[in-house]
Image (cartoon, helix red, strand yellow):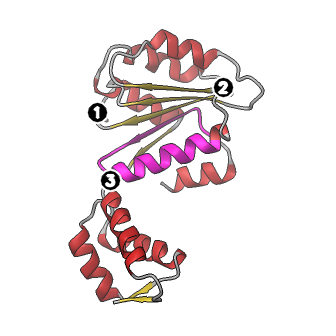
């Protein structure tokens, strides 16, 4: 994840990114952060594909097209099935070495076979980020940071109790934190 954060901060992007794993909140967060950093809100140089059965020739054709009045073209593909041996995976694997500097491919996948040729090609030419469930200590720091941004403080024991009730799903924790912040309006310390 440090590589993703650094690339977004420096605005130096690899030709291809793969976001996968069981933590949906992180995949969604990095997908939107990459999209915003690469396109700056421009929709003309952004293409989105979702689901199995994507036309690989169309994707490669778009990738080879120069961006219009922008530095980068972003092609975002979600749950394509390419990393589980789906049709077109071989063509994309062959194409990985020839992605133009003006194009960035971003794959957001639920299932990935790390033994596949396409996965190995992404690792070679770009960056593959496995976004799995976070450790309780990491979740506590993240949640405390959100509370701090909203002017709230929380003790370690209270945070442990909160996480024991909210679980380890970051989407759920985020939702519960919003409720907690609203409920404690006017108080600095959450007890």
Report if residue 32 lies within the magenta region: yes
Q: Secondary structure at mark 1?
A: loop
Residue identified by numbered label 3: 132
- Asked which secondary structure carries label 3, the reply is loop
In this picture, which residue range is highlighted in magenta?
Answer: 13-37
Residue 112 x %, y %: 31, 35
- Give the distance between the C-alpha atoms of the residues marked 1 and 3, in whole angstroms: 15 Å
Judged left or right of residue 188, residue 12 is right
| Residue position for label 2 | 44
Q: Residues within 10 Å of mark 3 (few under 14, many from 20)?
A: some
Q: Nearer the viewer, residue 142 or 96?
A: 142
Q: Nearer the viewer, mark 1 or mark 3?
A: 3
Q: Is residue 29 left or right of residue 46?
A: left
147 is higher (above) or lower (below) than 115: below
Q: Of marks 3 and 2, which one's residue comes earlier in the chain?
A: 2
Residue where numbered disc 1 is placed:
113
Q: CA distance from mark 3 to mark 2?
A: 32 Å
Quadrant location, the C terminus: bottom left
Q: Are marks 3 and 2 in contact (CB under 8 Å)?
A: no
Q: Identify the residue at the far right of this view.
A: 69
Left or right, 102 with reference to 171: right
First of labels 2, 1 by sequence position: 2
Extreme residue toward the top, this view: 57
Tell me the number on the disc at residue 7. Answer: none
> Residue 97: horizontal and vertical position, in percent?
55, 22
Work out how far the residue at label 2 is from the one at label 1, CA to CA, in angstroms: 32 Å
Is 65 in front, or is 29?
Answer: 29
């Amino acid at each position: 994840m440090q590589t993703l954060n650094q690339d977004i901060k420096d605005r130096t992007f690899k030709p291809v990114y793969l976001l996968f794993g069981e933590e949906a909140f992180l995949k969604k967060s990095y997908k939107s952060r990459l999209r915003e950093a690469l396109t700056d809100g421009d929709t003309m140089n952004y293409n989105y594909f979702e689901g199995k059965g994507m036309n690989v020739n169309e994707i490669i054709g778009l990738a080879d097209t120069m961006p219009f009045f922008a530095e980068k073209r972003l092609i975002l593909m979600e749950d394509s099935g390419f990393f589980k041996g789906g049709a077109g995976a071989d063509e994309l694997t062959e194409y990985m070495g020839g992605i133009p500097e003006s194009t960035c491919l971003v794959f957001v996948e639920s299932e990935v076979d790390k033994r596949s040729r396409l996965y190995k090609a992404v690792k070679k030419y770009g960056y593959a980020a496995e976004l799995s469930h976070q450790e309780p200590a990491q979740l506590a720091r993240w949640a405390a940071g959100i509370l701090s941004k909203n002017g709230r403080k929380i003790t370690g024991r209270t945070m442990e109790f909160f996480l024991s009730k909210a679980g380890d799903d970051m989407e759920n924790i985020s939702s519960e934190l919003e409720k907690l912040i609203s409920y404690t309006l006017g108080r600095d310390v959450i007890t």
